Amino acid sequence: MGHGGLPCIEPSTETITILHTNAIHRVRVMFCGCGTDVEQRHHYNQLLDAQLFPASFTTPKTVFTFTLLDTLCTLTMRGKVSVYDYYQSLRCLSDNCELRGLASRYDELGLAVRRYRNLLSLKRAGIAHNPNGIADMQEGDLAVDSPASPLPGKNLPPNWKTVFMDKPHLHAQFLALDANFRLKLKDRNAKSQLSRSQKLPEPSLTGNGGFFVDEILFRKELDRVQDKPPDKPKNKSSCDSSFAAIERSNSRFNRGFIVTGVVAAIDSRHGTVLANGVADLQKGERYFNTDFVFLSSLRRRGLDTVYVSYDVACQWEKFLDTRCEFFPIELRSHLGNLTIICAIPKFHLPAHGFICWSRYSLNFIPGSARVDGEAIERHWAATNPVATSTREMTPGARHDFLEDRWAFQNFKKLVGLGDSLERKLRSAISGVEKHEKELEELSSSQAPSIIEEWTAMVNAYHEDPASNPDPYRVRTQGMYAA
């Protein structure tokens, strides 16, 4: 080590274990001891210079090649290969008959790849170029964001509020909320780590810099809800929905789990997870968790219009402002000027009664274009294969792994954005021509007074759906029909 591979006049020789993609090796290494730079004399720095990642930074005896860690990260993201399975494959390559009695390095590999992923996220976010390093890291700085999502100061003009005054959907955030009950966490004496405390004994390395909400603030508010829950207004369901998401809190499938799933907020147009837009579930899909994620994901975006799609949006939006008053001012300060437009995803809408079919349909809400609201279900489909691994982890390791998983999914959306937008643009251009022609044919077959009457009905309904008749329903034998 050191001297560019040349011998050192004051070497120290040690035998270390090196894990590479082809096997586990025992290698004698000569460390340099004559360097004038104190930092360079540290063994871990000499190992890092040789692209060997040490399991310990005090007395490194086990190291992993960068190639192995990169390969493992890629296989984990692409092939859903767990660290345990990959390590067992290395043992087979090294001693398939198990005659050599290799000492286990599984725990060291798990810790090393976790730290390696965190360092890569800091590197990709540019934190290394900050003079103060991670000390100046803000909430959500490590999250991979979509360049197409509206964000003042990034991709909107300085006067965006006046430029898009008549078309607020052009600068609106399209947001999808949903819970996932597969991303659980087993109760392996982890209650002490998720107890009523603002300090977590085993925190995530990412902290609040990625996709999960500020865990300290979240736990503090969760404790407050348990001590003094907010007044529950009478919220009798006005929907015929067959969904039972809210009633899952006492499900027998949650027994033995300290975390029963997650609730997330994503950009429903581009399918990317929003920074600080994910929180754990403790007891079913409670409004507290969903509200916290909703407020946290929009906290620093600085927008004034948001389209929210949620499978129970018809009930969730009731008394939302009242429930949000229970949260601290730093979470809800942006709600004052925020226009919230709620919708139900298109695939979920038929399960609701006819009362919701028009009012919460993305087909009729102005500005929603062809958004279907189901992007979050496609996001879960890509995440679910790792659920069997994450439920066995510690709370902090689980957060770090899911952070890396969602950063990878966002990145794949980002690099494919050009082709995706081009396809959508070509489809939109041909669709405009088709629909304009059909609109002209329909308009020419009706009297101008009828068209004016229809237009007035539609505009009045969208201004105040509760007080005006639904123009999207037809009467059949005196009864409303879809």
Image (cartoon, grey):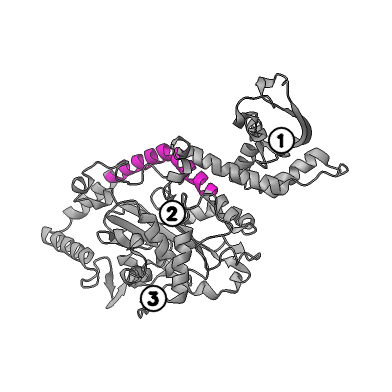
* Mark before the other along the chain sequence, 3 or 2: 3
**Residue at image mark 1:** 20
Q: Which quadrant is home to the N terminus?
A: top right
User: How packed is label 3: few (under 14 Cα within 10 Å), some, or many (20 or more)?
Assistant: some
**Residue at image mark 2:** 276
Q: Is residue 416 left or right of residue 74?
A: left
| Element marked by disc 1 | strand
Outermost residue on the right side: it is 99
Dominant secondary-structure state across the stretch colored magenta: helix
The front one of 316 and 330 is 330
Looking at the rendering, the stretch of residues picked out in magenta corresponds to 404-432
Query: Please, is residue 378 above or below residue 23 in the view?
Result: below
Amino acid type at mark 1: His
Distance between the Cα atoms at labels 1 and 2?
A: 35 Å
In x, y percent, where is residue 130? Answer: 43, 37
| Element marked by disc 2 | strand
Q: Is residue 250 left or right of residue 330?
A: right
Amino acid type at mark 2: Asn
Q: Which residue does the image show at 70% across and 38% down from the upper left?
A: 63
Outermost residue on the left side: it is 449
Res 139 visible = yes
**Residue at image mark 3:** 230
In x, y percent, where is residue 479? Answer: 29, 77
User: How packed is label 2: few (under 14 Cα within 10 Å), some, or many (20 or more)?
Assistant: many
Instruction: Indicate the quadrant where residue 145 lies.
Output: top left
In x, y percent, where is residue 286? Answer: 46, 70
Instruction: Indicate the quadrant where residue 376 lies.
Output: bottom left
